[in-house]
Amino acid sequence: MKIQRERNCEGGSTFRDNSMTRRLTGAVTLGTTAFLWAGVSISDPLTDNTPPDEKTRSFCDAYRNLGKLYKDPDNPYIQSFSLFGRMHWQYGHVDGTDAFGRDIDYDTADFRRFRLGAKATVFNHFGLKAQAELSNDDIPRGGTTRDVRFQQMWDMYVTFDAQAAFGIQSLETLTFGYGARETHTSYEWHTSSNKLKTVERSALSNKIWPSNGEFANATGAWMKFGQKDWYAEVGVFSTTQDDFWAPWSDGQMYWMNYQHDLTSVTGADVSTLFLTAYYQNSDSTDSFERLAGGTEWSTSAAFVYGRDRWQFLAEGVYGQNSEEVSESRQGNYWGFVFLPSMWLIEDKLEGVFRYQYQGSENPEGVRINSRYARRADSKFDDVNLLGGRGDEHHAYYLGLKYHFCKDNIHSLIGVEYDDINREGRDIYDGWSVLATFRMFL
């Protein structure tokens, strides 16, 4: 049965009264009731002598276990089953100047992500996972709807644990998988959106994410293998677009990543080397139909180091835009990200800084993030960023992250300055104030 849906880019201010909305409302009500029943003690505040930190732990433990519905390793058919999801609300305010020197004053709030999913372990060695994106918020671009409805499957795949199934002793990890999934093409993309230290990933990281034109992940087959301190993944993915499992009717993307834990060498709390690369051979001349908006290949190398209260990420990226896109966007691109962070209050409050640079050999080879300056460009007729594309882009971010329940419930606020140029001409420069509240199971 073919599912029909509108192709709004983002959503607005009213929820539609349809069966999907009613089911989601019922699920949220049921989940909230179960949460209260499972973990929140309602008692007389005059007689409740439980220390505040223990109450917080009890609350957070109950929340984290809310979606874990079944676990029995002795069951030969279903060993575990759980529900999960995430809800990220976000606010952005932009104060800047467009390509013609005109002022931009714009603010908006939107549901950045709203996903629900389920995962299970079956027949001891098979894993199943499916996660749907349900938010459709077009208010930031001038729309009038904020819908909750199916957009696409963010993840939908099956895995097979060959190491455990066959008792392979030479490897600690050997897994095969097939389906739609994220492919980690930078360390920022290796980090789940639930655990990001910044409100948005860098524009450089988003440039090399191999999503299709509908911001859905690619479908493919992969293998993961490794030992105690390292692992590698290799895979081949279809460049064809689809909301579920894509067919193999276009080109292919070949992908690999490698991660090595170096803490035994450095003696640090965190010390990780991360390498990744991909290449795609799609012949499409439409950047909307190509993965990563027209990127032909990309490589990145990252190192994460942490000791005591400090941690930093340093990552470099180098790649090439496809010759199939417009001439001004072709050629090589490069960039790097430096992101230090520090615990200001242990396990509660982090301070974060990020500097990102990206450049290209042709005048439109790199681009600023779509949120939020490009949203203003879409919404207002008197704002023109010339697509937000240029050949040199600097971005500086400074912010705070407060953890209510570790990463499961947290809030971030940050200020970012962007400056992008095209052949020496300012395309956009300005400040963004960003804030988000995130919760996930």
Image: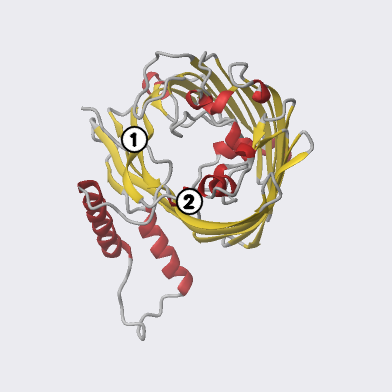
Residue 135 shown left or right of residue 426 in the figure:
left
Residue at 31%, 78% (x, y): give it.
43
Q: Which mark is residue 201?
A: none
Locate residue 348, reporting x and y percent. 57, 62
Residue of label 2 = 140
Earlier-in-chain disc, 2 versus 1: 1
Q: Amino acid at mark 1?
A: Ala
In this figure, which colouring scheme has been used for the structure?
secondary structure
Residue reaching furthest to the front = 382
Seen from the viewer's position, the closer of residues 151 and 58 is 151
Where, by quadrant of the figure, is residue 401 drawn?
bottom right
Choose between 313 and 109: the one closer to the eye: 109
In percent of width and height, residue 281 lies at 54, 13
How many numbered marks does the figure carry?
2
- Residue at figure coordinates x 35%, y 24% from the top left: 245
Residue 322 at x, y = what percent?
A: 61, 19
> Mark 1 sits on what residue?
130
* Relative to 272, 162 lies left or right: left
Q: Badge 1 local density, few (<14 within 10 Å), some, or many (20+)?
A: many
Closer to us: mark 2 or mark 1?
A: 2
**Secondary structure at numbered mark 1:** strand
